[in-house]
Amino acid sequence: MSGTDPTRRPEPGPEPAPGRTPLAGNAWALPSAVAREFDPGRAGRTSRRTARDWFTDFGCFLAAVLIGMIGADAVSANPHVSPAAAELDQVVGALACAAVWLRRRWPLGFALAMVPVSLISDTAGGASAVALFTLAVHRPFRYVAWAGGASIATLPLVYRLRPDADMPYGVAIGFGVVVSAAVIGWGMFVRSRRELLVSLRDRAVRAENEAALRAEQAQRLAREDIAREMHDVLAHRLTLLSVHAGALEFRPDAPRAEIARAAGVIRESAHEALQDLRQVIGVLRGGDADASGRPQPTLTALDTLVAESREAGMKVVLDNRVPDPAAVPAALGRTAYRIAQEGLTNARKHAPGAEVTVAVTGTPDEGLTLSVRNPAPPGDVPHVPGSGQGLIGLAERASLAGGRLDHAPGPDGGFHLEAWLPWAP
């Protein structure tokens, strides 16, 4: 047997997402209090009972009546009870059985009212048991302790006023205590089982919400990785295109050899940009870093990067003190390559004509250190807008690799970019 008044829910974690759960479709088989937890749409219909509620209420009423009939027969046959007192006992017991239908609305009041009623009516014994059970199901233990303690404390007085004809006084009291404790224990078991069911539902909803949040976070991180990779791959190529296109625009009278060389650089840079774009798109489509078939740049490709910058007209000095660049792990080498690429791109945009120094040092024990330094640009440089996303992306890339990235303007008006990356032996 169970009831449908709201039970105390355990402390929740993240708020469960609103909506119906799979058990909400079978709400007729649940107590209304539990059904409201599984189907928020029932929250405003607090007085509506489920089919299980009606079945349980009828069962409680029938149990109270059957136990009351046994008590009425015992009172009628008890030589210690007068006929008038027996009739009053039965009338009060009948009213108590009828009051069982009110147990859902006032469980505490009903249980407390049955304490004095049990003093004058043995027929109300079944209703008293139902009252204790209902209170144990729907209220915390402190209320059950007070009402149950009061009910048990009246047992010696009950059997003193109306001694049992078949059992000794002490045995009758012990039997009443055992019955009351069993009823209270059964009610507490039903309550704990109901709370467990609600907590398991909350845990399942919370786990589902956390899984959705993890998926959303994974998608966000993937988008950030894609944006960082797009910036690192294309910014260098497009900057070359911009520099040489600007040279052709402002030097239309340049010698044919220089125009041809600039056009060749533009064509080559555009081709490389398309290749890099295909590579990134291939990663997005196939989820494989090598989907395009092109090898990923590592520290051994740093010479090629510097050569491309020199062909674009930059003054670049490379100081590579790593004894064997091929021994550098691929992931570490690629991170260092992207940092150097972004540093050269920034120097080309903000300090054209300045000599850029790229220095790489490191060992497996000390880690890999890469710096890109340039002095102040010669002459006036037009303002080039920048969002700073490249440096932010490099800092994130270095952090993901377990390293750090520092950058700051130099005292001479230049700029210094330095990164340290761990190199596991």
Image: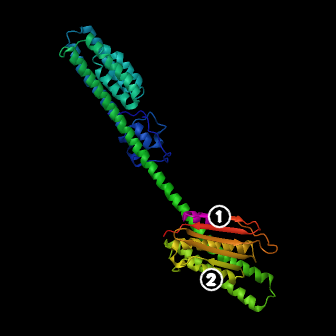
Give residue 383's quadrant in the image. bottom right
Residue extending farthest bottom: 256
Q: Is residue 233 left or right of residue 121?
A: right
Q: Is residue 120 left or right of residue 41?
A: left
Residue 89 covered by magenta stretch: no
Q: Which residue is mark 1?
A: 406
Q: Is residue 311 above or below residue 223?
A: below
Mark 2 or mark 1: whose residue is earlier in sequence: 2
Q: Is residue 103 above or below residue 48?
A: above
Q: Residues within 10 Å of mark 2 (few under 14, many from 20)?
A: few
Q: Position of residue 7 (x, y in %)?
A: 42, 34
In the image, what residue type sits under mark 1?
A: Asp
Which residues are the magenta region? 394-406
Q: Position of residue 113 (x, y in %)?
A: 38, 19
Front position in the image: 269 or 92: 269
Q: Which mark is residue 271?
A: 2
Q: Nearer the viewer, mark 2 or mark 1?
A: 1
Q: Secondary structure at mark 1?
A: strand
